Image (cartoon, helix red, strand yellow):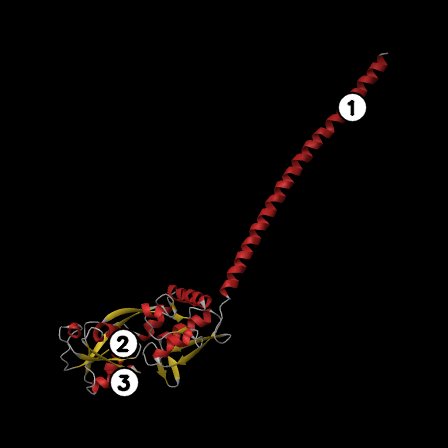
Amino acid sequence: MRKWIAFLMTAMMMIAAVSCAPASESSSQAEESSAAQESSAAEESQVEEDSAAAENSAAENEGASEFTTATEGVLTMATNAEFPPYEYYEGDTVTGIDVEIAQAIAVKLGLTLQVEDMEFDSVISAVQGGKADIGMAGMTVTEERLEEVNFTESYATGVQVIIVTEDSDITSADDLFAEGANHTIGVQLATTGDLYTTEDIEAAGLGTVDRYNKGADAVMALKNGKVDCVVIDNEPAKAFVEANEGLKILETEYVTEDYAIAVSKDNEALHTAVDAALQELIADGTVQSIIDKYITAE
C-alpha cells in the first residue's frame, strides 16, 4: 500500500513538473514574439520614412530640372553691349559684369551660355517671345517692366547721373526741375534714364527728351550742343567722360536703382532655377568678386 502511495506521489510530481515547464516556455515565447513584432513595426516605420524622404528628394530634383530653355542645353542671354562695365565688346567678344554673372549661373544649371547683342529696347521683347531665356543689360526693376516679365533678386545697385559740359549752367539735378526750366535731355532709348526723365521732366513740361539707340550717341549729341545734358548710369558715364574731354558728371545723383535678371512670365521653373542659382552666387561672394573686378572703390 505504501509503495502504491509512493508511486502515486511520484507520478503527481512528474505531472506537475511537466505542466509547469510549458507555461514558462509559453510566456518566454510570447515575450519574444511581442518584441519581434515591435522591432518589425519599427523597421517598417523607418522604411516608410526613408521611402517618403527619397520620394520628396526625387520630387525636388525633378522640379528643379523641369525648366526649359530656348535652345536645349543653352542659356541664351539677351543684352545690349553698350553699357560698360556691365556689358561691352572686347574685340569680337561681349564681356562685362552681367556676362560673367550669367556664365556662373549657366554653370550652376549645367548649361552653356550664349550671349545675344541687340538694341536695348528689344531685350524685354526677346525674353517675352522666348527668343532669349534671360535679359541682363544693367536692367532696373520697374513697375512697367514687372507687368511684362519676372525679375530675380537684385544683384547690383546702379545710380543714374547727369553728364554736362564743363561750362554748363546746370549745376545740380535740382536745376532740371526748377520753375521755368526748359532743358533738352539726352538718353539711351528705353533705359531707366529715358523712363525717369520722360515722366519727371517731359511729362511735367520742364523740358524735352531726345532718345538715342546708344549711350555713346547721346554723349556725342551733348558734345555737339544738341542736348543740354545726358542722364545715364554712373559706370558708363565715367567711361564716357574719361574718353571725351570737356565733359563732367554732376555730384548730385538723379536716382538710385537696383539691377536684376529678367525672365519670361511663361517659364516660372526657369525663373525659380535662375533666381536660386543667383542667390547662391551672391551668398558665396562670387557676384561681389565679379563686380569688384570691374568696379574699383574710389
Q: Which mark is residue 194?
A: 2
Q: Earlier in the sequence, mark 3 or mark 2?
A: 2
Front one among 73 and 210: 210
Residue 68 is situated, as x and y percent measured from the top left of the image, at 49, 70
Task: Please give the name of the residue rendered at 70% of the width and 30% of the height, measured from the top-left corner.
Answer: 24
Q: Which mark is residue 136?
A: none
> Label 2 amino acid?
Asp
Given this view, does label 3 or label 2 mark the residue nearer the observer?
2
Task: Please give the name of the residue rendered at 63% of the width and 44% of the height, measured from the top-left corner.
Answer: 40
Given this view, does label 2 or label 1 mark the residue nearer the observer?
2
Q: Secondary structure at mark 2?
A: helix
Q: What residue is disc 1 on?
A: 15
In the displayed structure image, the side of residue 143 where residue 12 appears, left or right: right
Given this view, does label 3 or label 1 mark the residue nearer the observer?
3
Q: What residue is disc 3 on?
A: 217
Front one among 18 and 239: 239
Task: Please give the name of the residue rendered at 73% of the width and 26% of the height, measured from the top-left corner.
Answer: 20
Q: Earlier in the sequence, mark 2 or mark 1?
A: 1
Q: Disc 3 to disc 2, how far (Cα)?
A: 14 Å
